[in-house]
Image (cartoon, coloured by chain):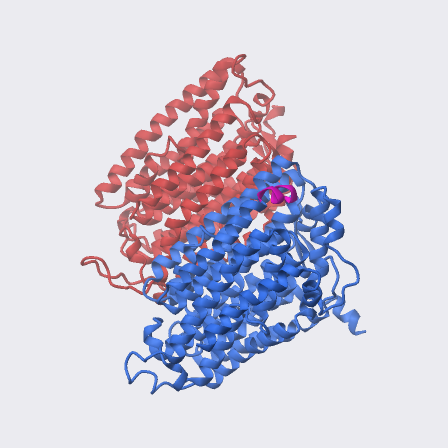
Amino acid sequence: MDNLNFSLARLFPEAVFLALVLVQMTGSMLKNSSSSLANFLIRLCPVGALLAAVLAACSLSAAPQDMFYQGYRIDGLSQFFKVLVSLGYLVAWFNTRPQTTVEEELKPDYYLFLTLSAFGLLVLSSAAELVAIYLAMELSSYALYVLIPARTRSKQAAEAGLKYILFGAAATALALYGLAMIIATQGGTVISELSQKTWLVPDNILAVAGLTLFLSGMFFKLALFPFHFWCPDVYQGAGNETAAYVATLPKLGAVIVLIRIGTMLAPGQPVTTTLAVLAAVSITYGNLAALAQKDLKRMLGFSSVAHAGYILVGLVSGTAEGLAAAAFYAMAYVLMNLLCFWVIARISTDGRNLTYQDLNGLSARSPYLALSLLAAAFSLVGLPPTVGFIGKLWLITSAWGHGYDWLVIVVCVNTAIAIFYYLSLVRHAYSEETIYHGAVQSLALDKSLMSQAGAVILALLVILLGIIPSPVYGLLLSVVKVLTS
Amino acid sequence: MITDLLSCYPLLTVLTFWPLLAALILSPVKNERTIRLVTMAAALIELVLAIPLLGFESRAGFQFEELIAWAPEWKLNYHLGVDGLSILMIWLSILTLPMCVLCSWTYIGRRVKEFHICLLLMTMACVGVFSALDTVLFYVFWEALLIPMYLMIAIWGSDDRRYASIKFFLYTLAGSTLLLVAIVALRITGGTFSIPELMTTEFSYGFQYWIFLAFFIAFAIKVPMFPFHTWLPAAHVQAPSAGSVILAAVLLKMGTYGFLRFSIPMAPVASTDFAPMMIAISVASILYGGAVALGQQDIKKLIAYSSVAHMGFVTLGIFLFSLDGVNGAIFQMLNHGIITGALFMMVGAVYERSHSREIVKNMGLGKYLPAFMFFWGLFGLASFGFPGTNGFVGEFMVILAAFRANTTLGLLVIPGALLSAAYILKVTLKMAWGQPASPASGGSWRDLKKKEWAYLALPAVLVVWLGLAPGGVLGLIEPSVEDTLKTFHQRNGRVDLVQVTSPAGRPEGLIIEENILPEPTVTTTEPAAAEPAETEMEK
């Protein structure tokens, strides 16, 4: 049993989350779901998440270690993503607190599935073998299938849930089929071994097709064109708090898998070129479609289609710099979107979907929320001095000079398209007109200390990581270099 | 001892980030009057902090340099420094701030705190743009300016602010997206983000060609050059006074500064090849801007279009690639900042009285507001380049360079100078002696208040001082310009021009007079430019 290499000490973050899942499961089995015990159990989630984040952060610079016959890999990259997932879960948990669209008796179950999904993503961060990746991905997806329709008495939510399951099932089937083809032709599933094999069209066409199909499963998670159809509908249909989670953390899972698989890619290969084309189409389509939206969450849905494309830009170069840039941008993406959804959930105190008009006069009602939204919007555009800018700069710098110069131009030109709808966020938040369209009354804002402090902390992170990106990026670069060497 | 202390004083960092710190100090203040006073104090402290900048030496190369590694993974540095191309623009940015605070004292009545924070952030970005010596840092400040400027137009603008602010943002952002592509391409091809290093790198012609085009779109929109100018009148008219002042005084200069700092040194051969196009567009800007300004009924729009024409002189001067042309262009950048900034503040002052920017609603002011009309007349004269004002020096040097390059070109520019005299005199005539729209208007208006005296006196002094003694300022910029042009001509393989553009041993302050003597064409044309202006004045 030499290759098992099991050491519990290195699995602490996962262990903490697994314990949390079990605790929540106990909570969901309680008879009285609004009892103080149930509440207490739910309150354990942020504590556990913080603990997991700290534990993962402690082992960031530890030496890489393969476990379970090379199927599970603990390295800097996986630990970095575990920190991100844990912290993202923490923010998402705080975001879901004023949960208004989930029935009281379902709350323990809601947190059970939320935690389960995050646990799946933690496992995914370390999965280094295609079957393990597949299983971890499904673990996190199945939880989401339950979460999305949890918005009570909403037909849209039911529709969104169904759509997500159907699309998800189709994408899963494709991925499995691709997996079978890879195993048949390359005779293995461990990524580090697969990356030594050839992935060229005339020699190994079945393997390339298999890899493409397997990647499709990831693209579905990432909502990349043409696997994006679920995205705007699910965002719109799910509750604001749920959408905040679905929009952010699962994409991290897809990105880490793509980075691991990205070590197998090199510029000029057919798979890579396909990726570049998909990225360009995704960016352009996402931005153009977002232009026409009125519902904020739908707009963010299409914007995330575009951002999925941006992340791919880092992958096509196949260099350590590019992969690190993709990871950095994934972090930036999660941060910006969590901030956006945070503000949206604070405005929509009754859980309704917001339109641009609902933002009117926000700056007068809560300058901090308005300022945070401004930071998020300009970061999503990619304006300095925000994390969105520096992330994009590194993506395009790594892509330039590897035969994908045209992709860089597509990215930059799209900034000019994207500015219009992100600017609308700012324009409405800072406009004077507080008169609402039709009979819709203005909502009471959630102006509690937690709501404003949360927004300001996230906004500060967006700006600070834009000004001082070096520590995080340097770390990512060093861990990715280990991976590619 | 003092020099030791000064050598470790991070002057440019302090100048750049003091406004940011001041904005943070301002954020908890509630009382509106206190907010204005604190901002004013911050602006004056900024001036005091800038005193060591007076120690700028008249030589080529960067001074007050600061270099800290920012993101070593990409060889990205926090690198600041000034040379002759940027020193005047930094002064202009710093001087604009107190005037903006003063001219908004009564003009801005709501959301006072946010307004002043925007002002301070803009000053930060302006100083940052002109002192950045790293392409990414430059881009960061370049874009960072957009956000407060957008907010300023969108929140404190007049009726059509939504349209104007979005147009402004879309145009300038669309331009700068390609700037980012160029920066990335330069990084990969040239191996560095550092501006001084890129300035000394020689790129292949094909690369220069594309880089020049990318720069051109970014900078031409910012300047703005015809036909990319359409955002400017909208933005100027809708922006509050202070916004217009910063827009005119500093923001437009970022475009021409970009040409000087990026296009010419980094793409010298392509610059030469594109020069005919650039000159043609510049002349078109001069003539078109002037002609359209002549037809305006709105004072602010008139000055906005006059900016298009004046900036045309600047780009023309730059792309003549001669010492006089570039010197004149940089001097004209400073002049235009002072004069147009002052004119916009005056439009704001008259708007506070009449609540209209239409010429017809502001006629016959000479009788009631003599001091106001005095300043208006002075800045008006400077604007069309009346001898004795700073406008004359800059415009004259550019026209001179144009004649030296090509007589036909010089003759083409002359109508532009005439047009500027025509539209300024037309509006001045009506405002001073026209029949007031209603007998009541004007009579009840107060002449200049103390604050207005304060913010008009400084530009007025500068107009006269720079007009009569431009030598000191020109001496500051000349070595850098000479150096830039020398490298430029060397790269173009024209050693002959290298010698011509740098005559040795020229005394400071006598540049203009010396130039007139050996050039007979100039002595005949210049009175032609100035005379009609004077005769119209007599009428």
**What's the magenta bit mostly, secondary-structure-wise?**
helix
- Left or right placement of residue A58 versus residue A370 in this view: right
Residue B119 in the image, given as x and y percentages of width and height: 49, 68
Residue B235 in the image, given as x and y percentages of width and height: 41, 61
Quadrant of res B322: bottom right
User: Chain B in the picture: what colour?
Assistant: blue
Give the residue at x 50% y 26%. A273
> Does the segment drawn in magenta span residue A164?
no
Give the residue at x 35% y 72%. B359
The total number of labels drawn is 0
Q: Is residue B293 visible?
A: yes
> Does the segment drawn in magenta span residue B269?
yes
User: Chain A in the picture: what colour?
Assistant: red
Question: In front: B121, or B285?
Answer: B285
Q: In which quadrant will I find the N terminus of chain A?
A: top right
Question: In front: B183, or B275?
Answer: B275
Q: Is residue A123 visible?
A: no
- Left or right placement of residue B412 versus residue A222 in this view: right
- Left or right placement of residue B46 versus residue A339 in this view: right
Where is A480 relative to B245, above or below? Answer: above
Residue A132 in the image, given as x and y percentages of width and height: 49, 27
Give the residue at x 43% y 67%. B423
Q: In which quadrant will I find the C terminus of chain A?
A: top right
Which contiguous range is marked in magenta? B267-274
Give the residue at x 59% y 70%. B390
Where is A277 relative to B502, above or below? Answer: above
Question: In front: A85, or B136?
Answer: B136
Where is B205 relative to A378, above or below? Answer: above
